[in-house]
Amino acid sequence: MSETTYQLIAIAIYFVAMLSIGYYAYTRTRSIDGYMLAERGLRPSVAALSANASDMSGWLLMGLPGAIYTSGLIEAWIAIGLTIGAYLNWTFVAPRLRAYTEIAGDSITIPSFFERRTRDTTRLLRVVAALVILVFFTFYVSSGMVAAGKFFESSFGWGYLSGMVLVAVITLAYTLFGGFLGATLTDVAQGLLMFAALVAVPVVALLQLGDLGDLVAQAESVNPDAFNLFTGIDGGAIAWVVGIISTTAWGLGYFGQPHIIVRFMALRTPSEAKIGRRVSTTWMIITALGAVGTALIGIAYFAGDPAKPIEDPETVFLLLSQIFFHPLIAGLVLAAVLAAIMSTMSSQLVVCSSALVEDLVNLAGRKASPERLLAYGRLGVLAVALVAFVLALDSDSAILELVAFAWAGFGAAFGPIVLLSLYWRRLTAMGALAGMITGAVVVFVWGNIDALSDEMYEIVPGFLAALLVAVVVSRLTATDQPGVDEEFDQMMVELDRPRVTV
């Protein structure tokens, strides 16, 4: 058999596994709470792996190795910032959000939690938050479809549309029927596959290439700053520090990413966030090291030899796997890239569905049976996927450019409101709404002015402005909010609830 045949067999095995997991989740999902939040029954290790897989997308396997291959270790600051941000998210947000969302009317979405936490009777806060989620995540899902189409186009010579349709249909199938549980369990499998690939590729390549010292010397001969984490400090300490802050500030985005923090809400108990934090941090450190190691080995192997040209630096991970592995195993590595894309898409589809059904349809005041709500949830997934598919039909569209903006937008619009909701009793509905809008607007304006965005990633000014506005407006609009202090105190007590051991 040809190498391509082996690789397609591996990807087919991966697709069958994902559909099987989706079917299993379908048999376990019987209510809208189960469809949206898996009945708050996730083990911490499952929640952690799911959050990581849905977070990283193809950036970890292709974007990060490609950036380091091009510029050296200085690009690793993004990974450092994300790892720190994820650790802080699990430490300061996860336990409180798990406890508070259940206490505040058993909220199963972020918009409904904001409304009940701030006692917003106008429902404006919930509607605006739901619309923000729908708009940004529809483009986010679309960008994943674009990436999938280009993946099959570049890897197997398929037509762009064929590859996009295949991945869209498979992802939609297990998400449509399996809901949150289906997305979560497939995320776990995909996270483990990504982990294995990012460990195996640099380790096997290193073992086959031989002496580590020779590889280091060869990489440094190509790029003297290949192993320099502090490149550019000679150009001015202040400018260098600003640049590092801008890069590591990606970690700020974690506090406001709905598809990540919803995993915290699904934990069995708040205290289990500690286990989730350990699993998540370990996964992120090891996979980031694997991505960095892959890039540095790639510099030594490809860049120093004119006979081994590499047209796209972002393919260094895929090329090394095809060189040092049997085609079947290389196909599983290719499947890991698909896993990164699909895990993110499925998680975002479920969050969009919950925003559409729980935060918009339900607000119309219509009472529906649990079965009908479950059907609405599935229709919501289908509707968002169809819109995203239409947007992705143009392979030359600028949708992919919105991914970084969406991360900053969610981080600045939702992040400060999540933190204030969990740590400051006096947050008001108007304060939350004003802060949310301010964060989104600052990110949009700052990100579209090159002179500003080139100096500082827009999430930093957006986050700070949203935080300031939310506090000031909350103080100006402060009123008596019956029950808020009692719920806050109850949340603090709930944090000490014993961990489930079964």
Image (cartoon, rainbow, N blue to C red):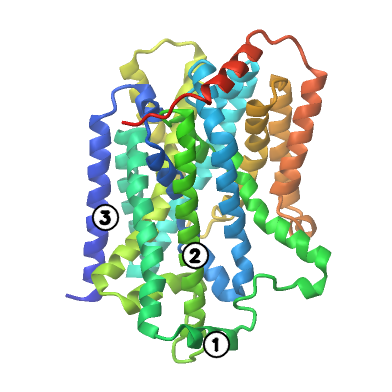
Give the amino acid type for the residue marked by disc 3 in the picture. Answer: Tyr
Q: Which residue in the protein does label 2 denote?
A: 289
Q: For label 1, count other residues whose C-alpha is less than 10 Å away and answer few (under 14), some (14-19) or many (20+).
A: few
Q: How much space separates mark 1 and mark 3, taking CA atoms? A: 38 Å
Q: Amino acid at mark 2?
A: Leu
Residue linked to disc 1: 217
- The answer to whether one can see residue 10 in this image is yes
Residue type at mark 1: give it.
Ala
Q: Which mark is residue 14?
A: 3
Say left or right for 148 vs 63.
left
Q: Which quarter of the picture shows residue 244?
A: bottom right
Percent position of residue 389, x then y: 42, 46
Q: Earlier in the sequence, mark 1 or mark 3?
A: 3
Q: Residues within 10 Å of mark 2 (few under 14, many from 20)?
A: some
Using the numbered discs, state the Cα–Cα distance from disc 2 to disc 1 in whole angstroms: 19 Å
At 49% from the left and 91% from the top, the residue drawn is 306
